[in-house]
Every structure is written in C-alpha cells, then in structure tokens.
Amino acid sequence: MFWENQFCVWRTIETSEVKKLRCQNLSFVAFSNTALSYNYSSDDGDANGIDFLHLMEERGVRANCQTYLWLLDGCLSSGSLTNGWKLHAKILKMGFCAEVVLCEHLMDLYIALGDLDGTIKTFDEMPVRPLSCWNKVLHSFVAGKMTGHVLGLFRQMVRENVKPDERTYAGVLRACGGGDVPFNYVEQIHATTISHGYENSLSVSNPLMDLYFKNGFLNSAKKVFDGLQKRDSVSWVAVISGLSQSGCEEEAILRFCQMHKLGVYPTPYIFSSVLSACNKIKLFKLGEQLHSLVLKQGFSSETYVCNALVTLYSRLGNFISAEQVFNAMSQRDEVSYNSLISGLAQQGYSDRALGLFKRMRLDCLKPDCVTVASLLSACSSVGDLLVGKQFHSYAIKAGMSSDIILEGSLLDLYVKCSDVKTAHEFFLSTETENVVLWNVMLVAYGQIDNLNESFKIFTQMQMEGIVPNEFTYPSILRTCTSLKALDLGEQIHTQVLKTGFQFNVYVSSVLIDMYAKLGNLYTALKILRRLKEKDVVSWTAMIAGYAQHEKFVEALNLFKEMQDEGIQSDNIGFASAISACAGILALNQGQQIHAQACVCGYSDDYSVGNALVGLYARCGKVRQAYFTFDKIFAKDNISWNSLISGFAQSGHCEDALSVFSEMNKAALEMNSFTFGSAVSAAANVANIKVGKQIHAMILKTGYDSETEVSNVLITLYAKCGTIEDAKRQFFEMPEKNEVSWNAMLTGYSQHGYGFEALSLFEEMKQLDVLPNHVTFVGVLSACSHVGLADEGISYFQSMSEVHGLVPKPEHYACVVDLLGRSGLLSRARRFVEEMPIQPDAMVWRTLLSACILHKNIDIGEFAASHLLELEPEDSATYVLLSNMYAVTGKWGCRDRTRQMMKDRGVKKEPGRSWIEVNNSIHAFFAGDQKHPHVDKIYEYLSDLSEKTAEKGYIPQTNSLLNDVERLKKGPTQIIHSEKLAIAFGLLSLSSSSPIHVFKNLRVCGDCHNWIKYVSKISDRVIVVRDSYRFHHFKDGFCSCKDYWLDQYSTAKFSESFEMIPRSLAENVVLNAMEITYSVYAEYASENAKIGDSRSGEQPAGTDED
C-alpha cells in the first residue's frame, strides 16, 4: 500500500523535477522504486526504466524483487523482448532466479512475446515449479499445436507427482483433438479426470465431448453432456454441432429445441450448427423458421449465421432469399461468397456464379480453393471448357493448382467437357497418390466406353499402391455394365470381396445393378439379401433388373416386399414397378402404384410419367395414353418411345406410326428403340411402304448397323411377304444374335420354306448360337409345313435332352399339328393325353383341326369337348366342330352345333381380304357387292374362270353346305373374298407389280387351287398372307407345296404366343405368327367405307367367307 501511495505522489512530479532528483545522492529504496514506477508509466518508460536501474546501481542502491516485477511489466506492455532478455540476465546475476513470482512474470513475458524457448528455459531453471507454471508451458505447447510436447510434459507431471487441475486436463484434451493420438489414451485421461473429481467441470467436459464426437463415439459424448450438472453455451455448442457433423441432424435439432425450452441464450455458432443440420436433411421449412428466431435474437448480422442461411436458401433453390441475406451482411468473408457461388453453380446458374466471383474480387477478398472449385463445377455443368481453362490458369498463378480439391475439380471439368486427352495429361501431372483423381479417370474412360483404358488405369492404380475406396469399384463396374463385360465385372467383384467392400451399400448397389442388367439375377438377389442396411437404391436396381428381363411378377413381388420392409421407394422404383405392370397388362395395379408415387411427391417425375404412358399404351388405353403423354412437361425420346412401342405391342399400330410421324416432324432425336418400335408397328399391319420409308431413315441415321434394328427389319420384310428382302437384310448383318436367327428362321417357316428353315437351324447350331424356345417354335412349324413328322419329333425331344429347354404349350401344339397333318391322329391324341402339363385350348384346337381334314369324328368330339370346357365363348371352337360334322355329312349335328352357338350369343368373324392399290386399302367380303368397281371385278372374274377352266381348273364343290343351302346361295355369294381382291389387283396394278393380298382366315382349297392357275395364265406373282402363313404363287406353283390343312384348321393357333413373355426383340419374331388383321380391317373399313355391321350378316357356321 505504501508503494502505491508513493507511486501516486510521484506521478504528480514534473519531468524536470525528476531529473533534478536523479542528480541528487538518493540512497533510500522507497524513493528509487517510486521513481521507477513513475518512469515505467511514461511513454519511453521501458528505456528509462533500464537507465534508472543503472543509475540505482551507480548510487549503490540495490533493486529488490518488486523493482524487477515493475520492469518486467514494462517490457510486457511495450512488447520489448530485447529488454526482457536484459532483465532476465540481471535477475540471474542478482540471484533472484529462485523467486517464483519473478519466474512466472518472465514466463508470461516470453509466452506473450512468442519466445517459446525462453519460456521453456525459464521453466527448466526454476528450482520449484508450481502447477501454474506447468500449465503455462503446457498451454504454450497447445497454442503451438505441439501435441507430442503436450503429452510429454503431461507424462513428466505425472512422474514428478504434480497433481493436474482442470486447466491442465483441458489443455491436454485440446491437444489430443489436434493430433494423431490413440483414442484409448483419451479414454484414460477421461477416467483420470473422473477420479480427480472433474466430471462436472465445464473446462474439462466441453473439449472431452468435442473429442468423442470427432472420433465417432456419440454415445460417450452424449453421456458426458447428460451427466453435467450445469451447462454453459459452449456445452450446448459442443453437443449440437457434434451431432450435426456426425450425421445425427435430427437429434441435433431436438437438442436445440431442448436448449430453447430451458431458456438458454443461444450463441451465433449454435444457430450456425442447427441451420447446417436443417440443410443436410432438407428441413428447409424449419430452417426458415429458425431464420425468424435469428432475427429475433439479433444475430442477423453475424457472419457465421448468415453464411449458414445463405447455404440453406441456396440448397432450397430460393436464391432471392439467399441473395437478400448475402447483401444484408455487414461483413462478408470468403465463406459467404463460397456458399452462394457453390449454390448457384450446383443449380446451374453458372453466369450468376461467375458474376459473383467478379464481385468477390472487387470486395478485395481472395478466392480460395473452394471458390475456384465451385466455379469450375459451374463451367462443367454447362460445358464451358474455355472459361474453365481460364480458371485453371488463375489457379496456377495463385499457387493453388496442387490443392487436392482443386485437382479433382479440374480433372472433372475436362472429363465432363469430353476432353479426355487433356484430362489424362493433367492427371499425369498431378500427385497421383490422390485416389479421387484415379476414380475420375475411371469415370472418364467409362463415359467413352473405353474398357481397355479403364482397366489399365485400375491395374496401374493397384501397382502404384493406391488403395481403392468405395467410389473406385463403382466407377469401373459401371463401365463393365455399359459394355456388358460380365466376366470382367465378376473379376472386379472378386477384388471387392478381398478388400472388404462387399458390405458397403454403395458398392453393393452398383454390383446389384450390374448383375441385374446383365441377366445374372440370381447373384444380384443374393447380394441384395446379404445387405444389412435398407438401401432403396439397391432394391430399386433389383426391381428394375427383374422388369428389364421381363420377370414382371418377381419385380412386383419384390416391390411389395420393399414396401413391407418400410423402405420408401424412389422415382426409379415406382417407374420400374409400373413398367412391370405394363408387362403383364395389370392396369389396375399400375394405377394403384401411380397413386402411391403421387402421394410420395413423384406426380411430375419424368420417369414415372414415361412408365405410365407405356402402361396405358401397352394396355390399349389410347385416350389415357395420349392424355398422360401430353401432361409430361419436358418430353424426351423415352416419352415418345414409350408411346410408340406401347401402341405397337397392343395392336394400335396405326397410332404408333402416327406418333412416329409426329416425332419425325418435330425433328426429335430418334434412337434404335424408336426405329425398332416403328418398324415393328409397320410390320404388324404389313405396311411395307411405310416400313421402307423408315428403313431409309435408318440408313440415313446410321442405325442400320444396330443388331436389334436389323432384326425388326427382317421381320418387317418377312411379314410383308418379301422374303428375299428379309434374306438380304439377314445375310448383310455384320453381327447376329439369337433373335436374328430366330427372325429369319420364322420368316422361312411362315413363307413355306421349311427346308431352308431347317438348314438355317443346323447352321445356327454349327456356329454355337444357342437356340431358345422361340427357335424351336419355328423349327417345329417348319417340319409341320413340309411334312417331316419324324424329324419334328426328334427336334422336339432334343429340346430337353440336348439343349436343356423345357417345352412350353406352344411346342406341344406344334407337335400335335405335325402329327395331325401327317394323319397320325391316334398318336396325336396319345401325345396330348401323356403331356406333363395340362393341355390348353391351343393344343385341343390343333387336334380338332386335324380331325376335320381326316374326318375323324371320335377324336374330334373328344377334342371339342375339352375345348368347349376351356373356352365356351370362342367362336372358332363352334366353327371347327360344325365344319367337322359338315365334311362327314352329319348335317343334323352340324345344325345343332350352329344352334348352340346362336343360343350362347357367340358370333363368328366373317372372312375378309385386303389389297393396297394406289395408296388406298380395299377390303372385300365374300360375294361383296358394294365395291365401287364391283361390275368390272365380276366381269373380269368371269373371264378368269373361263381361262382357268381351259387350263384344267375344276371348281371344288363346297362340302360345308348341303344341297338345299347351295341352291339358296346366289352364284356370287360363294365367291370368296381373296378372289375378289386378286381380281381387283390384276385390274388395277401394272403388270410388273406383284399382287399382295391379306386375309384374316385360312385360304380354302378351292381358292388355293384357283390362285395357282391365275398366277400361271396372268404371269404374275401373287402373294397371299392368310391367318397362318404366306403363300407365294408363281407359274402355277405355291411355296407351301400344297402340304397344308384344309381351310378350317387352327384359326387361332398363333394366339398362344401371347403367353410368352417378350422383349421388344422377341416380340418382333413372335408377332410374325400373330393374327393382326383386325387392326388392318378397321383401317380398310374406313377407307373402303365398309360398315362393321356387315359382320353380322354372315350366319355362324358357314364357310370361312
């Protein structure tokens, strides 16, 4: 108290007076110390203090401890480390080095002025070191991030039995957070703090919680927090930010709510953490509410909070609010700009992001690596390689081009801009230890489908010791999927197992996708079942794989199982499930799934909309398909393809071709699937003219090299009767698959070239092309057409014995047809009765048809009884049974069958034939009298009849009518529709043009014989396509070689093929055997003005016309 009073007195003395005093012989210490106190307080007190110390020594006055304390404070205040060293030397010289208080002041001086060596030296020289000095050194090490020194000093304290206090533990724990310290060491320290009674110390618990969170020990961190008796704002910051950064965003938000209820005043950092949590889990509405609370608490100008708000609104896409917050900030830092630039870049606003970069430069803020990386991302998204290269140059000048994040962004820029060469050069110039860069290069070569380079990169990566991560394997596996390299994909899968990534959800989802898309559904499902996490991407990939490979029932079952497991489907899952419904024509179920998709927020999703278009189109709901199609805001080629292919497959082929025409007029990009669907539609209605026009477009666009497109072209020409064009297309194909062979083989069979079909099959086997179920339908049909019964049975047996194929109902029907045509009816019946599967209507109908030809009533009635039981409403059964009784002369039975048909309200479709003349379709019924040129047609027919009679043609008496019925019919009523169509064609078409006639029923024997004579006398090629095959008539011969059943056989034989699940490619082949005349008839009726009501004029059970 004395010295303080003296100091106050002497502060009033003028400087000149002090100088006088300094010249006097003063010998008392009190005056000296007071004067020193005054001199220290002046502006140049540090230098004056040292000088006065010398003056005291000159006068023989010994300075005491207090003197040196004041002088050290002066050095600390002035920041003079040099004078501090001088004083330290004086202290040592004067023997005050044992004074603890002086040593502490020296340490404070050295710590404050950054002289760590001086601090340690002073500490080491102390004979007695109190805990405060240990803490000073320890915290100096912490400030210098010298974790090893901190831990070493702490161990020294323990050895010297210095008991740490909470400040000591706080320093050690902070040091552990900044270094590579084994976590068991932290747990040991935690245990020690508890034993010393510091479990409720905030200075210890707060950094301890931070450590636990950063190392993933969430429960331990929460246990520390919950055990605190008193919490400060730092504690709440630690738990909220820790939970948010550890992926427990919802719990972080709940903790904030708990804090708010307790009335704890939040800090800006707490708001920043909870806003970040809202941003991560897309709770944007809650984030907006927190913005209101920020305004209320007065933190709207805090930089941390504003940065979090800018990020929130940017992710939300609300750039108006984001820019309002940004512009209202009193102080913007680099993070502020980076948040908004990154948000703009991610949302595709590249120009605005670049403009903000210029503004950042005007604000004198230096862009960092994050800024440039975001701008490079903006350039990548719009493909602006030139501007991206400018930023690359900027990064080089700024010395940041070697930054890991920036290297990845630069490489990504070149890859996304398709400059793979520059990307590779840049990759070679980087530090190749960065696994991210290797992954980007794998993606780069995957984008250009260069599997060789991808595999080279992958191999080189391992040779250089780069450890693959969870993104490495998916990058190359996707390339394997794209190029259908299943073998290589399986090798990569082996490495996945070796490196322990088989349980990684991301890697597993890509593996499932690869196996599912490449047809190995068993392995894909096995991987899915092994997953412990409920990953929607993995389930969706499996469902999509089932749908792609036409396992529609399995796809829908798995979709239901996914929902039962509580996994919320994404848009791809809903789209795949709807596509599966389209595959099995499950319209109601598809609409239910669509309703679920709408509830989940996918009502406007493109993939769901496209799938729904396909569903309605495949199910024949034309109006709904168009309505759904029109609702899609931004239609892509998938939208158009869904409509075209759906209409083509549901029989609305004219609509399919109309949509294709609109797509062409709109100059939209078409792909192989577009052309395949359009050609298939043209083939289904035998529209060779439109088919050739599409073929020309295919040649022009270069898709003629696509195997799938060539396959549908083969079917087009085969179904339109130009088998030579089909052959040319087949043999000119650079690559063929099993569908190509099946298409050509079926075409041969349909055109009566049975031997050629069988020869092609043998060639197919020699080339190791594996036959499938469709192949054997064509082979067995070919054997039936040419009467090779024994060979056909041998082929049938080889299905299971040689090729491992289980015969389907259509194959059994082919064998029955084969035996029936050969007259082996008893054997055919025995074959049916011994079938391992239940015979369906197709099998019984085939047997009944054979009984008509061979007039076998017993077996015929046996077959008819089963057929009527299976399909009592089908008119073909009654017609076949009626015709069987007619050819055997059992007129009473025939009449009773007709009456039963009439009583049950079953009507038979009348026979019709069509021919195209001058771009118009002309349709004819038997005895037609309504055609505009009817008189010329009948007059020409009369002339033809005379000429054919002269060449030996003898009309066959219609055995299906008794004498009374023949007398009742006029002479023109028994003239069948194909004769009228052929006559009209001969009258209307040039002599060089072949006659192409289409008929919805089988051509009868009389007409078949008559057409042979007409082809000879007219010297014309006549092609008749009936309900079962093509007949090529030339020079009095038919391609079927007259080996065929009578006119009433197998009217619906080909309907059985609807039972086969089909891809577009298989559909091309199978459509060749379907009856498509009903669609054609509608078109013809519209052009020829023939009313549909005429179909009721024909009594059921008469001849086919």
Image (cartoon, rainbow, N blue to C red):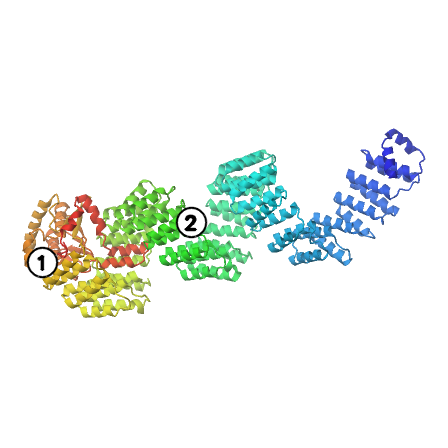
Q: Give the residue displayed 87% in from the left and 33% down from the top.
A: 9
Q: Where is mark 2, residue-wise?
A: 571
Viewer can see residue 392: no
Count the labels in the image: 2
Asked if the residues shown at circle 1 and circle 2 are in contact, with their CB atoms under 8 angstroms apart, the answer is no
User: 10 Å neighbourhood of mark 1: few (<14), some, or many (≥20)?
Assistant: some
* 435 vs 660: above or below: below
Locate the N terminus by quadrant: top right
User: 10 Å neighbourhood of mark 2: few (<14), some, or many (≥20)?
Assistant: many
Q: Position of residue 961 (x, y in %)?
A: 9, 58
Callout 1 amino acid: Leu
Image mark for residue 1083 = none
Callout 2 amino acid: Asn
**In screen coordinates, is 495 left or right of 100?**
left
Viewer can see residue 222: yes
Q: What's the distance in space between the residues labelled 1 and 2, CA to CA?
A: 62 Å
Q: Position of residue 916 (x, y in %)?
A: 18, 47
**In screen coordinates, is 340 left or right of 734?**
right
Q: Secondary structure at mark 2?
A: helix
Q: Give the residue displayed 10% in from the left and 63% down from the top.
A: 890
Which quarter of the figure has residue 792? bottom left
* 335 vs 716: above or below: above
Q: Position of residue 1040 (x, y in %)?
A: 18, 59
Q: Where is mark 1, residue-wise?
A: 961
Q: Secondary structure at mark 1?
A: loop
